[in-house]
Image (cartoon, grey):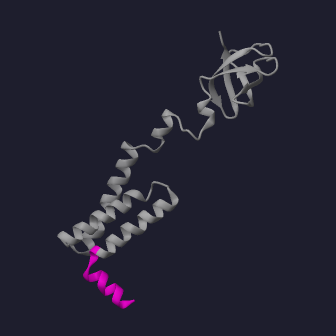
Amino acid sequence: MAGVIELLAAQPFWFWGGLAVALLAIEAATGTGWLLWPSASAGAVALLALVLDPGWTGQAVFFAVLTLVTTFGARRYFPRGGAAAYGDINDTSTRLVGQAARTVDAFHKGEGRIALDGKEWAAHLEGGGSLAAGAEVEVIGVRGSILEVRRRG
């Protein structure tokens, strides 16, 4: 163990490179997005240690500052939910918006059920009111497990 510590003290590039790889492996396994930037920062510190060797204190400070800047910068300029705004293919409820459906039974006081994509859904009629069974509606939103619909035509 003492030999490893001596090697890392003499060659900080390998410490920071190993940390970068370990953090990246954990990120790949978990997919959280939180360890990507510290991993990149550790890689940058490895290169800094190889070229300039500012000492362990300088490397640690550079790693801490770079990790904070890249993590907060990424959260600001690359928000995680950005792709969902265009529709997540795994979120079936958002794909239903804009589709036409038919009422299964008559709606009373704005509440009823519709058939869409081979499934039956609870639905709420925009503006309330009644609808006959078999009426055509359009899905305009999703509220939990209830689809918001409006009369079509």
- Give the magenta range: 1-13
**Quadrant where the image shows the C terminus:** top right
Question: Looking at this rendering, what residue extends furthest in the left direction?
Answer: 52
Residue 142 placement, left or right of 25? right
**At x 68% / y 17%, what residue is drawn?**
137
26 falls in the magenta region: no
Residue 67 placement, left or right of 52? right
**At x 69% / y 29%, what residue is drawn?**
117
**Residue 116, horizontal then vertical, whole percent:** 70, 27
Question: Looking at this rendering, what residue extends furthest in the front direction?
Answer: 118
Q: In this view, does 3 lie above or below 22?
A: below
Q: In which quarter of the image is residue 9?
A: bottom left
**At x 27% / y 69%, what residue is drawn?**
46
Of 152 and 3, the residue lying toward us: 152
**Residue 31, horizontal then vertical, whole percent:** 50, 56
Question: Looking at this rendering, what residue extends furthest in the bottom direction?
Answer: 2
**At x 73% / y 19%, what residue is drawn?**
102
**Quadrant where the image shows the N terminus:** bottom left
Question: Looking at this rendering, what residue extends furthest in the top direction?
Answer: 153
Inspect this view and state whether residue 138 appears. Answer: yes
Inspect this view and state whether residue 62 appears. Answer: no
Q: In which quarter of the image is residue 96?
A: top right
